[in-house]
Amino acid sequence: MKIKHILIAMAMIAALTTVSCNNQKSQNQEPAQEEIQAQKQALADSVLAEIDEIEKMYADATAQSFTIGSFDLSDAEKNVKPDYLLDPSASETLVTRAQKINALAIYISDLAVRKLYEMPLEDTKNAIVKLAADINFPIDMDFVTSDEPTSEKVKKTYEACKSSGDIALFWQFEYGIVYEVSYVLSCNPDLFLSKITEEQWQAFNVRKQQRRKAIDELAKYDEEMAQLVDFRQKSRVTASDEDRDAKNQSIQTAKEYYKTHKDKYAAKRNAMLQ
């Protein structure tokens, strides 16, 4: 009996020791979790401060860059209607937030092309408003039809996304805008690149660089942006296209580049909607 009592006592002591150790371990972990959260918040604060600085430079570059809507086509040029724009009906098949924000950016860019060629606009406008409502993105028909400078629209959209706590969505939208413009240029580089100056072209490349910086910063703590960085890396038109954009590439060099890689630009644009 004594042995039995001793064994029971030892078991109780072991159980109490385990509980005590677990409690101590739990207590030790709690500050660690708090520390991790504090580190994450500090990182987020640091990133967002950097993002604000990038946005200012992005808006400046946008003001100095070109917009497709500012091009001036002759009647003969307008008669050759583009067949590469995204059909507005495609908006009905999109499911994910990423698909919808990318399509929204594409339609905004394509709308400028449609205006340029005096093509029907209503279906594209409706697709834009619908997609913006679906993902709670702060643009409406006033944004679409306003003659306000693009850089001012950029600033207002940025501030609206910042106020709603969804600044990553702004940069995903801008990624789509800049890429769709690149895709459109690749479809007719001789025509479109003849409408801009070297200074406007360099400012456009700065826009691309600043947009990448913003996405890279946000990817440090935002999973959606990390996925966008991964997509960007996997779908680059060439292995060195980001380095190429960072250089002072001339318009003539860009024309040849777009002609050579037109199919790859189309493939990447399609991948943005998958």
Image (cartoon, rainbow, N blue to C red):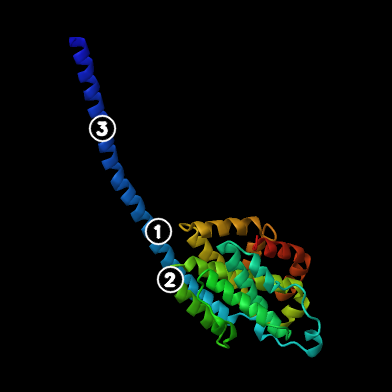
Quick one: 22 or 42, which is closer to the camera? 22
Residue 158: image location, x then y, percent: 48, 74
Residues under labels 2 and 1: Cα distance?
19 Å
Secondary structure of residue under mark 1: helix
Q: Quadrant of the C terminus?
A: bottom right
Q: Residue tagged by mark 2?
A: 164
* Residue type marked 1: Leu
| Total labels drawn | 3
Quadrant housing residue 181:
bottom right
Question: What is the spatial separation of the Cα atoms under label 3 and label 1, in whole angstroms?
Answer: 36 Å
Q: Which mark is residue 253?
A: none
At x 60%, y 62%, the residue is: 95
Residue 187 position by quadrant: bottom right
The residue tagged with tag 2: helix, strand or loop? Answer: loop
Q: Is 84 displayed left or right of 44 in the figure?
A: right
In primary-sequence order, the first of circles 2 and 1 is 1
Q: Please tell me whether residue 121 is drawn above or below residue 46 in the rendered image.
A: below
Measured as percent of width and height from the top left, residue 130 is found at: 58, 74
Q: Which residue is mark 1?
A: 43
Instruction: Tell me the CA gap for discs 2 and 3.
Output: 45 Å
Quadrant of res 111: bottom right
- Amino acid marked by disc 2: Ser
Res. 68 visible in picture: no
Mark 1 surroundings within 10 Å by alpha-carbon count, few (fewer than 14), some (14 through 19), many (20 or more): some
Q: Earlier in the sequence, mark 3 or mark 1?
A: 3
Mark closer to the observer (3, 1): 3
State whether residue 142 is above or below residue 183.
below
Give the residue number, with chain letter if any, for mark 3: 19
Q: Residue at x 32, y 46 (%)?
A: 32
Image location of residue 138, percent across then percent down? 50, 75
